[in-house]
Image: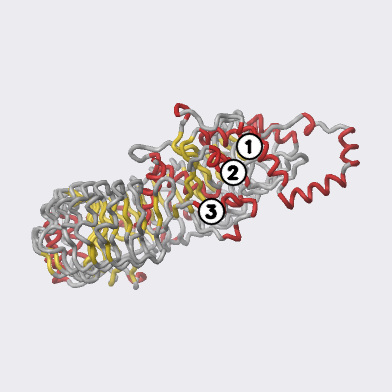
Amino acid sequence: SCDATQLCNCSSRGLDFIPSGLTDKTTMLNLAHNRIKHIRSQDLQQVVNLQALLLQSNQISSIDTDSFRSLGKLELLDLSNNSLGHLSPVWFGHLFSLQHLHLQGNSYGDLGESSPFSSLRNLSSLRLGNPWFSTIRQGNFEGIDHLDKLWIDGGRLSQYEPGSLKSMKKINHMIVNLRNTSVFSAIVGDILHSVVWLEVRKLAFNIRAEMQLLRVMSSCFAKKISFKQTLFTDATVPEIVSILVDMPKLVEVELIDCRLFGTGHWAMQIQANQSQTLRVLTIDKLSIEEFYLFTDLRAVEHLVSHFTKVTVANTKVFLVPCRLSQSLLLLDYLDLSANLLGDQSLVHSACQGAWPSLQTLNLSQNSLSNLEMTSKSLSYLRNLLFLDISQNNFGEIPYVCEWPKNLKYLNLSSTQIPKVTSCIPTTLEVLDVSSNNLREFALHLPFLKELYLAKNQLKTLPDAAPIPNLVVMSVRRNKLNSFSREEFESFRKMELLDASDNNFICSCEFLSFIHHQARIAQVLVGWPGKYTCDSPVAVRGVQVEAVHLSLMECHRSLVVSLICVLVFLVILVLVVVGYKYHAVWYLRMTWAWLQAKRKPKQAPPKDICYDAFVSYSENNSDWVENVMVRELEQACPPFRLCLHKRDFVPGKWIVDNIIDCIEKSHKTLFVLSEHFVQSEWCKYELDFSHFRLFDENNDAVILVLLEPIQSKAIPKRFCKLRKIMNTKTYLEWPLEEEQQEIFWFNLKIALKS
């Protein structure tokens, strides 16, 4: 179960004990989801270099006192969701390098008489609690000065000795899942000056008399307060607001998936001074059963003038009172997406004098249907620069509209508009009208730099004269057949044209022209587009600089025509046989491999430029480029990744690029998905890596399974993928946020090996 990097995956094997045969080379051991009940002293004696030990979701009820004695390099220990009835300090006494300890979901009722964590000087995250967890005593956290995250799951926590958490000097993020208001008050009293971000879960603020217990929060120095799955009532909201505005350093308040029983008729008026520090308010999925009876919020108008960023999304907002809008004097960002705002209510919400400093407004996924009325309602916002009104239902739009004078960005995607008119403001620098029913685009927009026209019905490129400053244009997934040299060259400042997934007829003249233009600007015309070509020219969905056309392909002679007629039947038979058995593909693959074999088997260390070459399908590029690259290249120390979009040498044949990049990379990382196994280019990269695997007698391949792949979905020509997956341990991308931290830890260890 261990790969060459000594990452041993023994999860879900039905094991009753920790297997023998572990060596000092093992760095990660995953024994989760088995039936292990007892950890013996000799089980882990040999794994002295172990960095991560995953034992969650077993049946562990006992651990020998010296079971972890040899694990001085362990950084992650997960014992969650087991049957531990108590915690012993002896278990953790030799875990000097431990940073992450997960103990939630067991059956212990307390943490003992002293601190189980006194020797864990490097601990940064700690997760505690279970349905039976009832008591926290003084001294339980002695030895811990600083935590990045502390999670206490105490649904039945009823006894808390004051001072238990005072030994901690700083807690960056503390999550408390409680039911008892008095216990919560006692905990807050101990962390007044140490917590930076306090997250409260599943606590019900429904009795006004209990609010006096929470008055201690008004002295808390936290900068951010989050309420998740929390209950509020009309009787308690005024007290909560009063407490929050009194907090001396509070900058941000967040309510996620909460409930409010009431209609805004507060039992008492909110008696509070305006906060001098509170700037950000986020409300997402706030459930108000009788939202249609909600009042005009006059009670909070005097509290919001210093807010700079407000998000109220997925909350069934159908109106923002004019006076409240006028009170938001410093607001520069407002997100009201996924609500019920209509044309008439927007007129009232964006009344004259409303949101005077607003620069960014998001009204996507509402009930707007009249673009003329929408634009006029917002025309008073003199400072508005960015407007998102996508995913509304405007349909036909007029020819004349009033807009904010300084508007630079407008998103009208997915708004059912069949035609764009002069209603669109001429001040725009970015316009997105993707996913509509447009058949043409002919607007005069002299300042426009970016234009997004994807998923429409266009058959020709827009005229360049009315948009002379265009730098980026996307016309992917339209109905383009071709475009001429004159059409493209008329866009004098163009740097990126994405015309992929169209219906191009790839004549030699067209491809030669595109090949020439690709040296000047990045032109995307390929995969997964549809092609009808007179010659077998492969165009990948990246830059078309790799297209090479021979003289024979572009200039057919009479001799070639006669030969083609004479051997037509033979060619037909060869094509049918070759198509059935992928003969052409294997011939091309063999030739590239023979060329690669002439090179030295292993690049000198000085020629290794990358930690890993990343092979992935274009359909998974969003996850790779925005999630994985950010996580790995911003790590400490950072990893250097090789991506075909960014690091391939322009003008070089793609196969040569693939071979060179794999040879110059310490590892080859495959991001597997249903789209991966449908990609011919991913097949090339897999085979080249497989040749290297056998030639060099090493294990340079890392597999990341981004989504489950059905075995029947893997084409037969991916036989090496089947073989590698049967012989190598691969990493699976978890959907649960808590498991993603372990995934990144394992991937970084594999890359370092």
Q: Earlier in the sequence, mark 3 or mark 2?
A: 3
Q: Callout 1: 10 Å neighbours few (<14), some, many (20+)? A: some
Left or right, 320 with reference to 625? left
Left or right, 472 with reference to 221? right
Gap between marks 1 and 3, in whole Å? 25 Å
Q: Callout 2: 10 Å neighbours few (<14), some, many (20+)? A: some
Q: Earlier in the sequence, mark 1 or mark 3?
A: 1
Tag shown at residue 687: 2
Q: Earlier in the sequence, mark 2 or mark 1?
A: 1
Give the structural element (helix, strand or loop) at label 3: loop
Q: Quadrant of the C terminus?
A: top left
Query: Percent position (x, y) of residue 663?
Result: 52, 34
Residue designated by label 1: 593
Q: Quadrant of the N terminus?
A: bottom left
Gap between marks 3 and 2, in whole Å? 17 Å
Q: What residue is rendered at 47% in x and 46% in y?
A: 702
Give the structural element (helix, strand or loop) at label 2: helix
Whether 293 is drawn above or below 113: the answer is below
